[in-house]
Amino acid sequence: MSTHLITGAGSGIGAAVTRRLLDRGDELWLLARDAGRAKELAEAFPGARTLVGDLAEPERLSWAFGHQTLPDRLDSLLHVAGVVDLGLIAETSVQTWNRTLAANLVAPAELTRLLLPQLRLARGHVVFLNSGAGLRANPDWGAYAASKHGLKALADSLRAEEHDNGVRVTSIHPGRTASPMQQKVHQQEGREYDPQRWIAPESVATTVLTALDLPRDAEITELSIRPGR
């Protein structure tokens, strides 16, 4: 049985990954932004354990974890949570930049730093659910794309630094995926949302498990996924 810590387990890709890992009997720790959300996650995923830490305030994660029991070892840390606010750079406020970078880049970096001892002990795996926006930047996507480009750089540096410790690092770059985040994006774009047009969260979950289950003689460093319809 493997032990995993997952962010963004409440919906979309995170929920799909959580269900798949629970179904095969793995031990799960789910990060929640507050106690109320932790209760919701515990009810939605019986058998999973919860930790409370707000990714919007990465500077407080160390304090929050200092008041909770953490797993002794981690076979994987799965960074799935993220936020998106579209807009022209000329109209994007400092508050939006800070909120986006905090949740999408700084929090994953800090969470990884805090849990590296457990990952090193297990010769574990860090998976960053990035985005196609982490490989290219389009109009209106400046803040989000910048955060995701930064996340790819974080993954690349971490992989090189932790290779000798046996820690594997994977960046997964899905295209548009049918999820509450995608519905929000369509609202911001003023477009009708049809989930059938986009990748199913379960398909992305399959790629995550493929990376996790790869034998130790190989490592998926980067994987792009695009809608097949």
Image: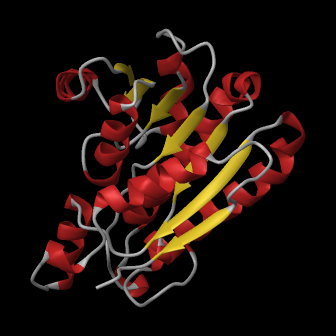
Q: Is residue 184 rendered to the left or right of residue 147?
A: left
Query: Residue drawn at (51%, 42%), measured in percent from left and top?
Result: 78
Query: Residue drawn at (72%, 45%), measured in percent from left and top?
Result: 168
Counting from the top left corner in percent of width and height, residue 120 is at 76, 28
Counting from the top left corner in percent of width and height, residue 13 is at 34, 53
Identity of the residue furthest to the right in this view = 164
66 and 155: which is toward the camera: 155
129 and 19: which is toward the camera: 19
**Residue 141 in the image: above or below residue 103:** below
Is residue 3 among the parts visible in the rendering? yes
151 and 174: which is toward the camera: 174
Query: Residue drawn at (24%, 27%), measured in percent from left and top?
Result: 45
Quarter of the image for residue 38 reads: top left
Counting from the top left corner in percent of width and height, residue 75 is at 61, 30
Is residue 99 among the parts visible in the rendering? no
Counting from the top left corner in percent of width and height, residue 182 is at 25, 69
**Residue 227 in the image: above or below residue 155:** below
Q: Is residue 41 rendered to the left or right of residue 220?
A: left
